[in-house]
Image: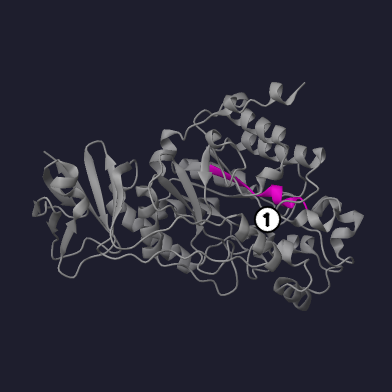
Amino acid sequence: MSKSDTIIWDKVHQDAPEWFKDAKFGLFFHWGPYSVPSFENEWYSRNMYAKGLSQSQHHIKTYGSLHDFGYKDFFPMFTGEKFDAKEWAELCVASGAKYAGPVSEHADNFSMWDSKVNPVNSVNYGPKKDVVGECEKEFRKYGIKYLATFHHQWLWGWFMSTDNEADVYDPANELYYGPALPLETNRYAPYRLPDDRFNEVWKAKVLEVIDQYHPDAVYFDSRTNIIGEQYRFDMADYYYNTFGKRDGIITYKQEDFPADIGVLDIECGRFSEAKPYVWQTDDRLEDNITWCMVQNPKYKPAVKIIHQLCDVVAKNGNLLLNVGPNADGSFHEDAKRILTEIGDWLRVNGEAVYGTRPYDTAAEGPTSVKDDNYDINRIKNQLVEGLASDIRNTDFSSQDFRFTRKDDTIYAIALGWPADQKLNIRTLSLKNTAKKAAVVQLLGCDKSLVFTQNDYALEVALPDIKPGDHAYALKITFA
């Protein structure tokens, strides 16, 4: 049978479902055996085997040689004794997230569900719990859509070491690391691509999670393009058609799938203008350059995340935010506090975020936002250096606005509180809108605001007392 007879990508065309368009904000959690050493980042399982890299030097100094103490030896230490799926669900609710899930499998061949495909999983090792299953059950109780994230295409060449005495080359350990491969397979685009055996297992893991947990969204990290096209197509066809998840959605990075089979995810990314299609950015709460718990963790302040969320939503995107738990399954108190602060803001201003669609103009103000994301060049540099580069969030002012809409109602979100308590919004001038404002309200305040509208701007007088912090959403209805 020819390729054209079996791969028909039009069969798996899928627009973003309404729930995804409405949700705007999600959470996911990098948690696995790499959380035990908690050193530098979640690529520890790879970089510990690359002689000369800081994580390898740390590993040998702390745990011993790569022959005597390999990644598999962290499994008994990954006990997750404080893991409580109900507490994770409650944290999602507190944050205002509408979809969420733990990383189903990172690049390390450690499945976080009760897997028959892969015996190296969180039921047989480590916590001895079905982490994916317990989270799926609890999250749904709270009305949170369930997200499954997959990074396991990176397993191809992930553990190949520059130390030929490392335990990854012991045939007895193939269960944990896979078969030994040429060192060049740990590049982003290796010459030797995954064989049928690897591709089959890759697909089988995804289908097993689909069958057992019915995820509402299935996220794929970058480098999925190394998986054979037939296997990628079969997976998507199974999810959308055979399994029948017609209100589900696949998210993907770069050009790993055809553009119309799901939602493009740009890692740590942003766009300067609104897009005609729904998109997603996945980013970190962590202010360290890591996606997992590390020693001496730092976190971005709530104002940074709230401003990022407003910018992303105004441009037709969703923000999927990561926070990494401790190895024991608990969350750092600072992370919980900041996520709750974000949720408190959304409880006041969520009307301007959830269920909205882009306005004709996405942004106004002096602060520019450039197109950027964690692209292939950055990934390749990380593969060499072992450490990720950073993409910093933009600092906004009270002169910066982001716009959303629901039907004929427009929301203008000011990304600061002006000292003179006056907002001048040029986008909503009579000249620019040709519509006359009838009522202007500030979310979180009971009374309508005094305003004037002329050819230059919609000029709004703010109340003496702020309804909160960080950003302020005006609700404008028109005559």
> In the image, residue 285 lies at what x, y percent?
48, 62
Does residue 94 show up magenta in the picture?
A: no
Q: Is any atom of residue 303 visible in this view?
A: yes
Residue 176 located left or right of residue 85: right
* Amino acid at dot 1: Pro
Which one is nearer the viewer's eye here, 234 or 395? 395
Residue 53 located left or right of residue 470: right
Residue 51 located left or right of residue 283: right
Magenta span:
147-157
Q: Is residue 358 above or below residue 284?
A: above
Quadrant of residue 465 within the rendered picture? bottom left
Which one is nearer the viewer's eye here, 156 or 320? 156
Q: Residue at x 23, y 65 (%)?
A: 417
Instruction: Tell me the quadrant of the picture where the C terminus can be found.
Output: top left
Does residue 148 show up magenta in the picture?
A: yes
Q: Is residue 58 above or below residue 76?
A: below
Q: Residue at x 62, y 32 (%)?
A: 236
